[in-house]
Structure formats: structure tokens, C-alpha cells
Image: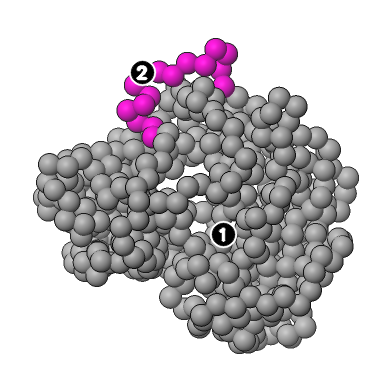
Amino acid sequence: MGAVLSKRRKRKTGVGEVKVVESCMVIPSEETPRRGLWLSPLDLMLINRGHTPTVYFYRSDSGATVEHFFDVARMKVAMAKALVAFYPLAGRLGVGVHGRAEIDCSGQGALFVVARSGLTVDDFRSFRPSPELRKLFVPCVQHDSPSVMCAVQVTFLKCGGVALGTAMHHVAADAISAFHFFQTWSAISRDPSAAQNPPVVHDRTLLRARSPPFVHPDAISVFCPKLNLSDLSGPIVSETFDISKDQVAALKRACAGDSGRVSTFCALSAHVWRCVCVARRLPPDATTRLTFPASVRRSLRPPLPAGYFGNGIIWLGAAGKVRDITSSENLSSVTGRIAGAVRRMDDELVRSAIDYFELTLVETDGQPAPAGCMPETELRVISWLGMPVYDVDFGWGKPLAMVRAESERAGFVYLMDGGQGGGGVRVHICTEAEILSDFQRLLYAKL
């Protein structure tokens, strides 16, 4: 399955420690293509984002013995089979003959770590992102060279539960593709004969720039190619807030206005945007902007194949004067601004975005993005709503919760389904400590 790399390492944090008992590379169970995988402009714009850290928490099924709950050997066999179809995840970040970054697909393997801890699932019942959560449960691969594309850590907890930490390089996959892999891996663990559904497609030239590249003049007003950063001005905190199914329904009714219907994403994004603006006490005449990733998969003509594996997102934006965003009578209008940006994403906009990134492409060495936070007038909302987060069932039950292990930076918000089919939404926010109390009060004030 792979050579053992190291054993018996400890990681300590202020909340506890884990002991690594095994670390090895899992390689594909069958021969896979050996080649350099060309990366699209939408991949390369994310190359310095590094690895996306997530943690799944599982409680022990009373019907499973300790020896069989999260059987490591079974999980390794299943991963080896899954890596046949998802072979770029067994590769490494490399450089092609023309100096353009690529994934070196040579079957080197995905990192698989096994650890034990005296902590319990209940020690993390708030499921709040934190540096400690990442240090404890997510394999440390951000400094490896060449970069591993995928790493996982199975940590057996004192309570009998398991924390499954994952680190997938963003140049390899966006959230849709990442969850496709984890769904497939877990499905094979449940049933070794499980088919790839949908079939995986690795043709990233589907997102190649046009020749010659052309950026439509209207495109820049909708998509937001750059991440604006400012210096940290004080303590930063991450917190999680749960919005119930009934609260979500009430908010959507308030946001609908004359349109009659509004998406959960648009309603919650509008509400959070307004709450942050008020909590930050922004000047009424200032211009504030909300940005968010949107999948290009169905906007292209023809659409990308359902199993396209890679990055298929661009960043869209909506803006307005603070007084217009924070007006108590204007929530449906704020929602409309966000929905309007979504509606404007069509084939030409996506192609213009791809061409823009190709024209402005600056090769990097894959080092982490610079430190800093979003300017106080900006907010970035990342939605994992509707993603198959809770389908990652290896045969011992669905996860109790899944969380991004650590927030990227202040000014980022993540929206996720509350889990277990409850219909609620979990809001993860990373923001200035001084506004958190006001934000919480405003978030729930009219729900």
C-alpha cells in the first residue's frame, strides 16, 4: 500500500495533544497515466492558496467493535481504489517544460496518517474553526516540497469516536471536485464494487483560454479577479452560529420581496453582509462589496461534464453604499443585488474571466498567499450549501459534523448545511474580535 514514513510523533496544543502512530503513502491500486497534467487559468489563480483543511467528526456506532470502527486497512484499500480514477491526487505539484505549473502525475501517492488522542468529540462540540483544530487533526503538509496533493489523518479519540482531517491542495480541486473524491472513497469503503458516479473527467483544456484571449468590457464589473488585503488592526476570532430551519425560512420570506422566491445563499449572504456593515459601524457614504465564488460548470456552453475534476469557480461581486445595504427596509433589494450578479454569469462572462487570468497570469512557486485581512468595507462569503458533506460515510455512519479546520483570514464567511437533514445552516465567520458581540446580536435580532 505504501512505505511507512514515520511513527510516534506528538502534536501539542493548548487544548490537548495527538500522537501519530503511523504515516505512509497510499498509491493507486492499478497503473495510472504518467504525465504532467496541464492546469487551467482557474487552477493557477488558486495555486498559492495551498491546502484546504477540513475535519469530519464521527461518533462510534455502538454496534461496531473498537477494532472494526474505522478499520484503517479497509480505508487504505478503498483509497487506493479511488485514486485510480482520481490519480492527480496521488501526484505532486511540478513545473512543465515551459515553466508553467502542472501536476506531476507519477503515482507517488496520497499521505495517510493514523493518530490517537485523549480528546473527545464533545471537546469540539462548537465545531469552531481554529489553528488548534488544524494542528491536531489535519496532516501538516503545507511546507512539503514538492507539494502533496492530498493528505488525510484518522485520529482515534478517547470517546471511541474519530476525527478525519483532510488537506487537499486547491490547485488540484475546488470544493465540488474535492467532495466528489471523498464521496467516492467512502462509497468504495462501504462497498468495494461501487461505481464512479459520475465518471471522472480530467480534461482541463476544457477551460483553456481563447486564442486570442479577449475580456469583454462588461465582465470586470461582475467578476472580481483580485483579493484585496489590508493589514491586521487587532485581534481576530472565528465563531460558528447555527441558524435553524424555521429561521432560514423566515429570513427567506423577508428577503423575497415582490420576487416571491429567493435562494438560501442569497438570503443569508444579504443578511450577514448587512449585519457586518452595521457591526463595523461603516460610514454611510462608504462603498461596501460582497464577493463570493460561483461554479462555472453549468454556465458554459456546452456545460462542463458532471464529473469534471479541477477548479471550476470564478469570483463574483455585488456592491453598494453602506446606507443602502444597512437600511432596515431594504433587505430584499440587497438580496436582489447578489442574485443579479449570479444571473449575469453566462458563457461569455466565464470565458472572459478565463482569458483575464491567462493574460494576467503570474507564475508563483506555490508559497502561501500573503498575510492580511479583507478591508473592513469588504466581505467574502463561501457557500458549501448543498454540497454532499454528510455523505462521507465509510460504512460506520455519517459524520456528526464537518468543519473547515481553520479560517483563511478575517472577512471570510462560510455557509454550510447544519447536518443530519435538519434544514438549518451553520455560519462560520472569521472577523475582528471587537465586533463579534454586535454581529451575533444583529444576526439573530429579527430571525
Q: Residue at x 74, y 59 (%)?
A: 111
Q: Position of residue 387 (x, y in %)?
A: 51, 54
Position of 169 with respect to 412 (left or right) is right
Q: Give the mark, 2 or 1, whose residue is nearer the N terminus.
A: 1
Instruction: Decide which of 196, 6 is in the foreground and name it.
Output: 6
Classify 10 Å Cα crowding around label 2: few (below 14), some (14-19), many (20 and above). few
Q: Is residue 390 shown to the viewer in this render?
A: no
Residue type marked 1: Pro
Quarter-wise, where is residue 100 in the image? Answer: top right
Where is mark 1, residue-wise?
A: 53
Q: Amino acid at mark 2?
A: Pro
Residue at point 77%, 83% (across, down): 67
Magenta stretch: give its range: 209-224
Locate the C terminus by quadrant: bottom left
Label 2 secondary element: loop
Q: Is residue 105 above or below residue 393?
A: above
| Secondary structure found at label 1 | strand
Q: Magenta span: helix, strand or loop, mainly?
A: loop
- Foreground residue among 416 and 321: 321
What x and y, as percent, mark residue 27? 83, 54
| Residue 50 makes an appearance in the image | yes
Color style of the picture: one colour
Residue pointed to by mark 2:
217
Residue 355, relative to residue 324: is it above or below?
above
Residue 313 at x, y percent in the picture: 50, 38
The verdict on residue 214 being magenta is: yes
Tell me which residue sits at (58%, 46%) in the image.
Answer: 367
Q: Quadrant of the N terminus?
A: bottom right
* Mark 1 surroundings: few (<14), some (14-19) or many (≥20) residues within 10 A: many
